[in-house]
Image (tube, grey):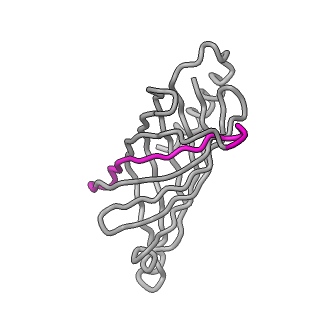
């Protein structure tokens, strides 16, 4: 499953040289995140790594619909289960709203709200991030999200690379 992620990154990088005038309202984002359990979840699980890929379609200048896949591996507390791990993987669908220009144009902050479909459960995610353009087609996106799945609560903190087409 993970073999297609580097190939997708190479395709996105090759297409990033497209002139700005020919830019479509579509973007692909590759993410590396840390999953941090909170509330009662933090008593059972420890921080774990995560990754994701997300596609978005800008339907208005400050609004985009997104869908993607993510996976997090939270370590089970040694007192509960030695050498244990909880894998959270699944899909996410939602909307992203731009909330200004960042006061000087260096970055564009945004808010996102979406639904999670992981391991036969549904949940919700809400987060904030900033889109820092590196070129016309490429930007860096630090982001923090809160995710809730039944009795599992965790925060994700991470960095993404967004490629616009």
The residue at the far bottom in this view is 79
Q: Of residues 130 and 138, which is closer to you in this image?
A: 130
Residue 153 appears at what percent x and percent y? 40, 66
- Name the residue: 44% across, 26% down: 59
Q: Is residue 19 above or below residue 44?
A: above
The residue at the far top in this view is 22
Residue 135 appears at what percent x and percent y? 72, 29
- Name the residue: 57% across, 23% down: 165
Horizontal relation, residue 151 to residue 128: left or right: left
Residue 149 within the magenta-colored segment of the rendering: no
Q: Is residue 52 above or below residue 76?
A: above
Horizontal relation, residue 14 to residue 119: left or right: right
Residue 116 within the magenta-colored segment of the rendering: yes
Say which quarter of the image contains residue 152.
bottom left
- Report the magenta residues as a range: 103-121
Horizontal relation, residue 62 to residue 39: left or right: right
């Amino acid at each position: 499953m993970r073999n297609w992620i580097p190939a997708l990154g190479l395709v996105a990088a090759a297409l990033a040289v497209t002139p700005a005038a020919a830019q479509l309202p579509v973007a692909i984002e590759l993410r590396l995140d840390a999953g941090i359990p909170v509330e009662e979840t933090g008593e059972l699980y420890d921080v774990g790594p995560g990754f994701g890929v997300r596609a978005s379609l800008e339907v208005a200048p400050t609004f985009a619909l997104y869908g993607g896949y993510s996976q997090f591996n939270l370590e089970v507390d040694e007192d509960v289960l030695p050498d244990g791990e909880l894998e959270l993987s699944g899909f996410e669908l939602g909307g992203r709203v731009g909330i200004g220009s960042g006061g000087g144009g260096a970055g564009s902050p945004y808010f996102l709200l979406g639904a999670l479909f992981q391991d036969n459960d549904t949940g919700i995610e809400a987060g904030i991030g900033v889109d820092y353009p590196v070129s016309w087609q490429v930007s860096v996106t630090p982001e923090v999200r809160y995710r809730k799945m039944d009795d599992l609560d965790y925060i994700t903190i991470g960095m993404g690379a967004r490629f616009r087409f």
